[in-house]
Image: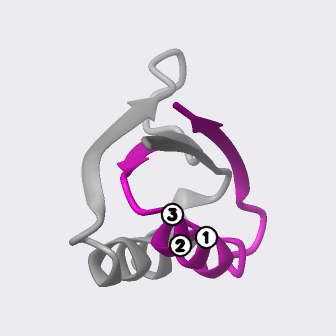
Amino acid sequence: MTIIIGIKLPDKINNAVDFQAILTKFNCIIKMRIGINNTSVFCSSSGIVLLQIEDTHQAIELEKELLDISGIELQRMIF
């Protein structure tokens, strides 16, 4: 099973350290990471990140920790 987690980080300037710490903690289960920046605004304060995860249980734990970050939004696709 492949899980794609879409993460919208509305305040990446203030939340980048916490966000990166969580991704580092779960780095062994992240198969792919793509960052999507808003190119219409120079140095946008928001961003979207896509993660590919193979382990359902660990994906749930990762999502729980990410949702502790203020304002973050998550979406999930399962294949």
Question: Residue drawn 47% across and 74% down?
Answer: 58
Name the N-terminal-most of marks 3 and 1.
3
Tell me the magenta residue range.
50-79
Q: Residue furthest front?
A: 1
> What's the mark number on residue 13?
3
- In whole angstroms, how far apart are the C-alphas of marks 2 and 1? 5 Å
**Image location (x, y in percent) of residue 35:** 37, 38
The amino acid type, in three-letter code, at marker 2 is His
* Crowding near the residue tagged with mark 3, few <14, some 14–19, many ≥20 C-alpha atoms within 10 Å: few
Name the N-terminal-most of marks 2 and 3.
3
39 displayed left or right of 27: right
**Image location (x, y in percent) of residue 38:** 51, 26
The amino acid type, in three-letter code, at marker 1 is Ile
- Local SS, label 3: helix
Residues 38 and 60: in front is 60
Residue of label 1: 60
Magenta stretch: includes residue 62: yes
